[in-house]
Image (cartoon, rainbow, N blue to C red):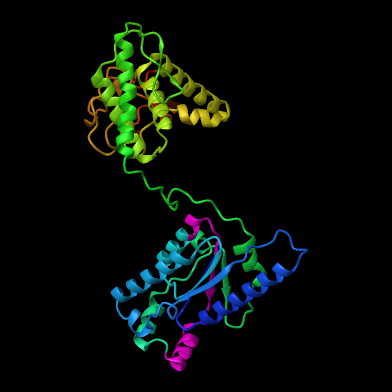
Amino acid sequence: MPLVILSGLPTSGKTTRAQEIKTFFETRLAAQAQDESVAPKTKDYRIHIVNDESLNLNKHVSYNTAADEKKARGALMSAVERLLSKDDIVIVDSLNYIKGFRYQLYCVARAIGTPHCVVFCACVPDRARAWNKESGAYPETIFEELVVRFEEPDSRTRWDSPLFVMVPEDKLPEDEIWDSVILKKAKPPNMSTVVKVVKETNYLYEFDQTTQNVIQAILDAQKSGDPTKQIKAPLSSILLQLPPTRVVTLSELRRLRRQFTSINKMHTLLDMSRVAEGFVEYLNQNLNPYHQALHQQQTTNSIMSNALDMSLDDIIKTSRPNRPRNNTSSRGGPRGGARSSGPTRNGRQGRDNRPYQAGVQQYRTPTAPLRTSEIRQSAPDGSKIQVSNLDHRVSAEDMKDYDYPDT
C-alpha cells in the first residue's frame, strides 16, 4: 500500500537505504503479526523494490541521451503503477532527481488512496564522485550531467512531504517512517488524481433519450391546455412547473437542452435518473419566473447575511465608488496632458495665463481664489498698511502703484 520514494545524487547510498527500509518493514510486520497485544492488526504486506537492476536497465545506456532517459523513466513508472496496491509496499530505488517525476509518483499514490514519503539521501558531490570512481556505476560525463540537473526535494511541496533527509552516517528514522506510511491515513483522491470511471458505450444515446423524453412531456402538457399544473417528467422525482403566462417553444427547449448538455460534459452523471432530475431542475430555474425570483431572493439574502458579518470599514470600502488614481485626473484625462474645458467657475474659464497688465486696482474686489500671504507697505506719513488675502499673482512691486489716501 505505501509508496517510499528515494532521491539523491548518483552513488549517494540510495540502494543501501532501500535495503535497510525493506529489512525494517519485514522485521516490524513480522513482530506485530506475532504480538497479540498489538491492536489493530496490520495487514500482510508484500514489499517490492523497484530500481534499474530489477528492470534490466543499463546505467551506461539508459542515461546517455534524453530519449533513452525518458524510456527508462517510463519503464520505472509502469512498474510502480503495476505493483502499487493496498496490499503492497513499493520502494522506488532510483535517482528521482526531477521534481516533475516525483509529482507523477505522488499522483499515482494519491489516486490509489495510499500514503507516501520521500527519503532524500544527502551527500556532497565530491564524496559521491569518489564513490562513483570506485564502483564505476556511471560514466564520468553522465555523472556530471546528472549532478547538474539534480533538483533537491523540498518539504514545502506536497509531493515531497513528508521528507526525511539523511546523510550516510545517520541512522534510519524507523518510527517516523512507520508512522508516515503505515499508521497515517491517506488523503482521498481529488479531481486531478482520481481515476475516472469508464463511460458506457451507449451513455450519449441514453443521455439524449432522457432529455428528449422530458421535452416531449412538456410539449404534451402544453397541448392539453392546462399550463398551470405541475408535470411529472419521466425518471424524475422533481415536478416541472411551466410558466403560466406563455407557451414554451420547441426552439427554446432545444436551446436549454444544449446548454445542459455542455454543462454535463464537465460533471458526468452516469445515473439517468439523476440526469432527468438535473434537467428538470435546470428547466425550472430558466423557465419559471417564480423559481427565478426565488433564486434571486436567495442570492440577496446570502449577500445581506454576508454584509451582517462584515465590519463597518469593510462595508464602506465595498460601497465606495471607484475614483481615479494618480495617473488620471478628476476630469477623466491623464495628468500632465491638455486640460479639458470643464464647467465655468465664478465666471472664469480655467486659469488666465496672460501676463499681468492692468495694475493692482482690479484686485480691490477680487473674484479669484485669494492667497493667505501678506504684503506690508509703508505710507508717505510713516504709517504701516497691511494688505492680506491677495491673489497669488500680486507682488510687492504691484503695491507701489497704489494711491494712498490722505489722512
Taking the view exactly as shown, the residue that stands out farthest to the bottom is: 134
Quadrant containing the C terminus is: top left
Q: Is residue 66 above or below residue 303?
A: below
User: In the rendered image, which quarter is residue 273 located in?
Assistant: top left
**Magenta span of residues:** 109-136
Residue 154: percent from the left, percent from the top? 50, 66
The stretch drawn in magenta includes residue 243: no
Q: Is residue 146 above or below residue 393?
A: below
Residue drawn where x is 76% and y is 65% of the image = 36
Q: Is residue 272 above or below residue 38?
A: above
The stretch drawn in magenta includes residue 120: yes
Q: Is residue 234 visible?
A: yes
Residue 353: percent from the left, percent from the top? 23, 31
Q: Tell which of 204 and 120 is nearer to you.
A: 204
Quadrant containing the N terminus is: bottom right
Q: Is residue 381 visible?
A: no
User: In the rendered image, which quarter is residue 107 located in?
Assistant: bottom left
User: In the rendered image, which quarter is residue 182 located in?
Assistant: bottom right
